[in-house]
Structures are given as structure tokens and as C-alpha cells.
Amino acid sequence: VLNNLNIEKNGKLIDFQMSDIYSFSISLWEIIHREIPWKSFNRDINKIKNAVFNGKRPTYLNIDENSPISLFLKQIVEICWSSQPDQR
């Protein structure tokens, strides 16, 4: 049972559940785009970690702004990757 696990960001503890929600948003982004997020970072974990901790998020590609489903999924992703963990 993974209960009460935390990660640290800038000396502050972040609830593990909030990290799971962020991870879900990245997975959903991957499914929508059929791309690897942060592809330009060549899987450099330090570059990705720094980008995420500095509030950067993958960009959207080819989202059909006229599709209610696309817009709905985009909203879900954006809520789940909020830089404020308590707003996820």
C-alpha cells in the first residue's frame, strides 16, 4: 500500500497523490498526441525535472479547437498538471 508517500521540491514535501495526478496528465497528453513529452530534451531527466519544477509543460499539437472532446481532454490535462498541487 502506497500511503503517505511524498516527494521533495525545493525543500518542501509534495503529496505523492498529487504527483500521481500530474503523471496521469502527462500520460493523457501522450495518448492525445501519440508523442513522447519533452522529446526535445532527449530523455535527459535533469532537463525534464528542471522544466517541470519551473512550471513548464509540454505544448499542445494539433488540438481541434472545434471538437468538444478535444477541448474537454485538454481541460482535464491542464487541471491535472497545475503547478499548484492542491488545485489538481
Image (tube, rainbow, N blue to C red):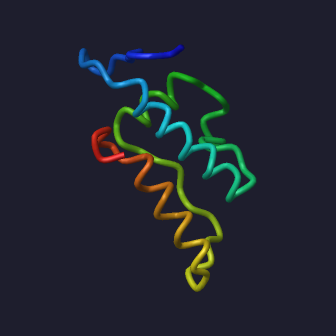
Q: Residue at image x 49%, y 58%?
A: 76
Q: Residue at image x 53%, y 46%?
A: 25
User: Horizontal placement of 1 versus 4: left or right?
Assistant: right
Residue 38: give x, y in percent of width and height: 60, 41
Q: Is residue 65 above or below residue 40?
A: below
Closer-to-camera residue (60/81): 81
Q: Is residue 79 above or below residue 65?
A: above
Q: Quadrant of residue 44?
A: top right
**Which part of the image, by quadrant, shows the N terminus?**
top right
Q: Residue at image x 44%, y 56%?
A: 78
- In the displayed orientation, state which residue is furthest to the bottom: 66
Q: How many marks?
A: 0
Q: Is residue 55 above or below residue 10?
A: below
Q: Quadrant of residue 6?
A: top left
Residue 85: give x, y in percent of width and height: 32, 38
- In the displayed orientation, state which residue is furthest to the right: 34
User: Horizontal placement of 85 versus 59: left or right?
Assistant: left
Q: Residue at image x 47%, y 27%?
A: 49
User: Horizontal placement of 9 versus 52: left or right?
Assistant: left
Residue 43: give x, y in percent of width and height: 65, 29
Q: Quadrant of residue 79?
A: bottom left
